[in-house]
Amino acid sequence: MAVQILVNLILTIFWLFLTGSYTINNFILGYLFGLLLVFIMRGILPGRFYLITIYKILKLFFVFLVELVKANIDVIRIIIKPTINNAPAFFTYHTDLKTDWQIALLSNLITLTPGTVVLGVSDDRTKIYIHAIDFSTKEEEVESIKSSLEKVVREVGEN
């Protein structure tokens, strides 16, 4: 991805030198021409086309924001209630992610959502140990993580 971005920027600067015009409009036009050339050369450049990766990263960001808002609403509901009747619990989450950066990213995203904390990762990197402030059922918690956060983290890491 970084190589493709660098090639695109070099082509853009080359376009600016060729045209002799250094306006923002000409820069954007050169960037679009460079983007087209990078798309054509994607077979010889390493990795997938970088706009797809940027799209997946933005998708991950927005899915995390949705999960963050939902978790904040859940925590506010617990705080507002006059009696405390939540059921905190520890549980083990089995992940299908393979690379260390994906597991670390998923663990950080889980910890950043209010009401959950990642306590650790197993040595074989297949289990994540989590504490939830309000634990309904393990199946619901696991399905919530697997269908949202883990899914988009996996998409970002695919080639």
Image (cartoon, rainbow, N blue to C red):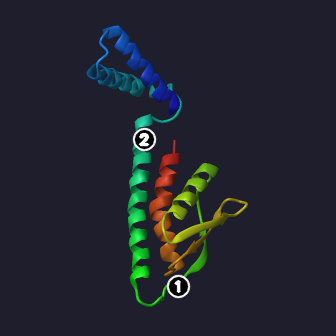
Q: Determine the residue positioned at 71% across, 60% down.
A: 124
Q: Residue at x 53, y 47 (%)?
A: 157
Q: Could you say which is closer to the camera, residue 30 or residue 146? A: 30
Tell me how far mark 1 sits from mark 2, CA to CA.
39 Å
Q: Position of residue 84 (x, y in %)?
A: 48, 88
Is 42 displayed left or right of 20 in the figure?
A: right
Disc 2: CA contacts within 10 A as few (<14), some (14-19) or many (>=20): few
Above or below residue 48? Residue 62 is below
**Does residue 147 lie above or below 85 as drawn?**
above
Query: Which SS class for mark 2?
Result: helix
> Which quadrant would residue 22 be assigned to in this image?
top left
Observer able to see residue 99: no
Badge 2 is on which residue?
54
Relative to 28, 64 lies left or right? right
Residue 139 higher or lower than 155, as above or below: below
Name which residue lies at 62% across and 53% down. Answer: 98
Q: Residue at x 43, y 69 (%)?
A: 71
**Where is residue 63, by image quadrant?**
bottom left
How many other residues sit within 10 Å of disc 1, few (<14), some (14-19) or many (≥20)? few
Q: Which residue is mark 1?
A: 87
Residue nearest the viewer, comparing 41 with 142: 142
Mark on residue 35? none
Residue type at numbered disc 1: Ala
* Label 1 or label 2, whichever comes before in sequence order: 2
Residue 54 is situated, as x and y percent measured from the top left of the image, at 42, 41
Q: Amino acid at mark 2?
A: Ile
Question: Which secondary structure, mark 1?
Answer: loop
Q: Position of residue 53 (x, y in %)?
A: 45, 41
Camera-nearest residue between 10 and 150 = 10
Q: Where is residue 141? Give x, y as percent.
A: 50, 73
